[in-house]
Structure formats: structure tokens, C-alpha cells
Image (tube, rainbow, N blue to C red):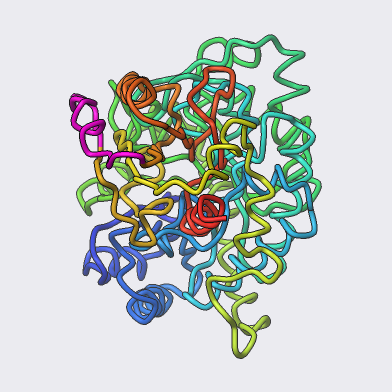
Amino acid sequence: MTGLATLMPGFEGPELPAWVERRLREGMGGVCLFGTNVHSPAQLRALTQAIHVANPHAIIAIDEEGGDVSRLYQSQGSPFPGNAILGRLGDATLTETVGAQVGWELRAAGVDLTMAPDVDVNSNPLNPVIGVRSFGADAEVAGVHGAAWTRGVQSTGIAACAKHFPGHGDTAQDSHVSLPTVTADEATVRARELAPFVAAIEAGTLTLMSSHILVPALDATAPATFSRPILRDLLRGELGFEGVVVSDALDMAGASGGRGIPAAAVLAIHGGCDFLCIGTANTDEQITAILAAFDEAVAEGDLDAADLERAVRRVQDLGASLAAARSERPVPEGLRVGQVPGLEAPRVRDAFEVTDAAAHALSTGREVAWVRLEPAANIAVGASPWGPFALGIEPVATVRPGDDPADAVAAIPAGALAVVVGKDNHRHAFAREAIDALRAAVPTLAVDMGWPDVSAGYADVATYGASRLVGEALLEAVAS
């Protein structure tokens, strides 16, 4: 029994490589598209059509969260606000509408599965990878809006993927580069981390993504992606999830670090995953090595052939159902992309947190001098235009780690208000130093377009997102 149907590699570039096409014809389960695969709507549609010609039941997945993480809009910044703003606005109907709009745009592009929504509860303000991708720090908020977004996107025939089970919100590490640990006790994990996943399951999510994190309260030894107690006993047995379990990318350090991707693939199927996201720039040789590892593990008794067969069947069934949805639910004629009625910039501003001092500073009518704080890009977000800079705002200075903040101070015109804009300002020493230096020299307004720690004092204005739409709302707030 081949495990090819369980594999979902990524590849570089706008065209379908010959080896991927061949593997799809042989029965590979699907592919995951990333920013490098998306150059234009017409190009993307041609690519997805080529994939479905090679395998009509192939599942084409993409990371489209409708906010900071956006592959459809990687090159220009997203026209959607992102989860944290939706959570703060508190309108589940609006959240469902956003999910549906994202779904129809994915359908128009020929995609089948979005790796969203992120239903992690971002309870740790030092979290380096979730942040504004979360609907909030409250489990009930995350559950209500995660369920609403799921209903919206799946109403279009796109499969949702609630992530990152059993919850990546209470970590201060990024599983792309390490193996984070959630140290909360079992009662806390169940009440906080698991609750939004229960809501997404009840909303009918077709898939769910595992996380490469340790949760000792649930399994003291294995990361969730490899954990039978977490994926088989808890998720399937206790929570009753019957859909497809998608692994987070196996090229991440939290999964393959120290063992390699083929060994990680075996452990993921053994643990309870069905559909394996391999990574972003995979090769035919990697697929061959993974299939050989499956065969060897089955032969040596390290992997039950029945587990592999069940995973194959789940992926194939999902692929068939999504193919049927493509033919049964046509994309509405005249679909207007990149906009959600009722969610223009003024509405987004309602989610901002503005201190009294910031409101006063904005009322003075001073000339504005923009300063950009540029930390290393969040790996999940990738390189993408953000905030007001996605709309063409040219800062008088850009400060990066290692830069001298005095250069930014010197760039501020006399009498101007320095509006210094960053993401997660409190987490970055260079950002704190730049804000402190500016405040000591000139009138300064600190804007945090990430997940702020307001008590730290580096967010006079907190926007809870950095998409292009949020940047437009910030420009209006500064100009008003």
C-alpha cells in the first residue's frame, strides 16, 4: 500500500514542475502553494488547472488566513483585516462574511483547502509566531470567531483547517526554528487551548492542523504531530473529530530537527496525521525517501499498515468531495475581489486601541514624519508589504536591528510628530531603543501593528494587525 496519497509537497515558482505533475498522476494527494507560486490571478488559475488536470482529486492547499498571512496577496499586502481585529470587533456575522469572501476568492483561483482559521488563543504576549493571527487571548472569543470563519469559508466549497492543535498560543518560541513547550496544567489546556478547536469541530471543519509543540499535560514525550495520545485518543476518541488531520510543515525544526523529514513523516502518520505538509521547496528525491521510509517502517513494525491505509483513504475521500464541490458550487458571476462590504477602513479603526495621550497628539495638526521599525520577518508571514508602507508611505527613516536610532532622530523635521511604526514593539530591543530615543528628542507617537503589550509602554496606538487594509485605517486615523 503506497503512502503517496498522504503527501502534500511544496515547490518553487509559478509553473508546475514535471516531477510534481508526474507524482500527481501517480496519485499524490496534493500540493501546498506559497508566495513564490503566486505571480498573478491568471497565472495562479493556470497553475491550479494544470494540477487538477494531472489529478482531478488532488487537494490544492494554501496559507490564506485573510490578514497578515496571505498568499493571494503576498506581493501587495492583504485587503482583509486579520483575525485579531475581527475578534476585537466582536461581530461573528462579519467574521463569517470575511471567511466566505476569502473562500470565493480561493475558489476563483482554483484552490481547495486553506490552512485557516488560526484558532490558537494568544495568551502569551511574547508569542513570536501567532500574535495577530489569533482571534484573541480569550478562549470564548477565539471559539466563536473561529467557528464563524470556518462556516463562512466552507460555505464556498473550500475546506477549512483549524490550527494549530492542541494550541500554539501560550508559547514564547516559534516551532519553525525550535520545539516550543506549553507548560500549562491539563485543566488550563482543556479550558483554554482546546475550547476553540471544539467549536471549530462543531462548526464542521473538514480538516485540522497539528502543531509541532510539546504539551506535557497531554503527552510528556512526543510533539503533538507525533502524539497518539493527542491525535488519536484526544482528538479522535474524545473530541470525535472525523475529518483529515493535516500536519504542519515537516521541514520545520519542531518536526524534523535532528531526525530528517522521512523519519518525521513516519512518526506523523503513526501519531495520527493523515495529510503531510512537507514544506516549501521540496524535491522528487525527498518524496522517494519518504515513501521508502514508509515501506521500511511497515516492514519493521514501526508503522501499522492499517494506519497508513486509513490516512490514504481519508485524503482520497476529501479530494473527491472537494472535486465535487468545484463542479456543484460555481463561483458567483461578477465576484468583487479584495473587499468585504461593511468592513472598510473606518470600521477597522473601531478595533484600534488609542491612548488619551495619542489622541491628543493626533489632534494637534503637526506635520507627520513616519519612521518604520523593521524586525526580521515573521516566518509564517514571510516578506510582504505591510501597514501604511503597503500603500506607498515613504518613511523618513527605517530602523532595523543593529541600526543607530540617532539616525532616525536626526531625520525628523523640526516641529514634526514622529509616528514610529513597528510590530510587536515590546519584544524587540532595537524597537524599544528607537522609540525611547525618539521620545527623548521629539514629539513621538509609537504605533504597534502587531500584538501589543500595552503595559510595556511601546504602543500609543495598537492596531492589532498590519495588513494593507489596516494600514489604510491607520492613515485615516493619523490624518483625522
Residue 145 drawn at (x, y percent):
74, 47
Q: Nearer the viewer, residue 257 or 378?
A: 378
Q: Nearer the viewer, residue 253 or 222?
A: 253
Indicate the quadrant where residue 198 lies. Answer: top right
Quarter of the image for the C terminus: give it: bottom right
Residue 428 lies, with reference to residue 392, above or below; the image says: above
Residue 384 drawn at (x, y percent):
34, 53
Horizontal side of residue 328 vs 30, given as left or right? right
Horizontal side of residue 32 vs 118, given as left or right? left
Total numbered labels placed on residues in the image: 0
Residue 170 lies, with reference to residue 239, above or below; the image says: above
Residue 90 drawn at (x, y percent):
77, 46
Residue drawn at (51%, 55%), measured in percent from left and top?
479
Q: Nearer the viewer, residue 478 or 333?
A: 478
In the displayed orientation, state which residue is furthest to the bottom. 333
Residue 109 lies, with reference to residue 190, above or below; the image says: below
Residue 235 drawn at (x, y percent):
69, 33
Residue drawn at (53%, 43%), measured in percent from left and top?
364
Residue drawn at (56%, 51%), measured in percent from left and top?
477
- Magenta stretch, residue numbers: 399-415
Residue drawn at (40%, 49%), measured in percent from left and top?
367
